[in-house]
Image (cartoon, rainbow, N blue to C red):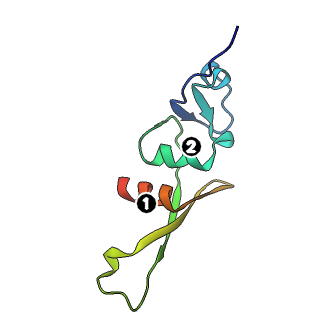
Amino acid sequence: MSYDRPRLLAIDPWDCGCTECLTGEYKPLRMASASDIAALLCGELAGNTSATFQVEIRYEVRPDSDGPLSKAAPTAATVSCDDRTWTLDRYAARAVLGSL
């Protein structure tokens, strides 16, 4: 018999050990990956934590380019919460920026 892991639905508090976390429907914040955090910030996952996140987005700007700063492209993002930091790649950074 095979066991299909349930789809991740939410991020729970740091040390959560509820049934949903044990079955894989939810994930404690301490176990979240960078892609989980990006999905949380984009609204694809529910946020069951009362945590506050700090988001820093880095941009690539070329001085010789034509156009305003609004055309600058995000190259990465760093998300921090308590004592944990996640680094998002350029694609996740763009998705997060678009959802803010």
User: With 59 as the anchor, is 72 left or right in this view?
Assistant: left
69 relative to 36, above or below: below
Residue type indicated by callout 2: Asp
Which disc, if any, is residue 17?
none
Q: Is residue 100 visible?
A: no
Q: Nearer the viewer, residue 41 or 1?
A: 1
Query: What residue occupies the far left of the structure in this picture?
Result: 67
Q: Toward which corner of the image does residue 66 lie, by quadrant?
A: bottom left
3D distance between C-alphas at marks 2 and 1: 15 Å
Q: Residues within 10 Å of mark 1 (few under 14, many from 20)?
A: some
Query: What residue occupies the far top of the structure in this picture?
Result: 1
Query: What residue occupies the far front of the structure in this picture?
Result: 1
User: With 80 as the anchor, is 97 left or right in this view?
Assistant: left
Which residue matches tag 2?
A: 36
Q: Nearer the viewer, residue 69 or 41?
A: 69
Residue 43 position, x and y percent, is 41, 42
Is label 2 in contact with label 1 (beta carbons under 8 Å)?
A: no
**Residue at the (44%, 82%) spot, across then down:** 61
Residue type indicated by callout 1: Arg
Which residue matches tag 1?
A: 94
44 relative to 17, above or below: below
**Residue at the (51%, 49%) spot, across then down:** 38
Residue 92 position, x and y percent, is 49, 55
Q: Earlier in the sequence, mark 2 or mark 1?
A: 2
**Residue at the (68%, 22%) spot, across then down:** 22
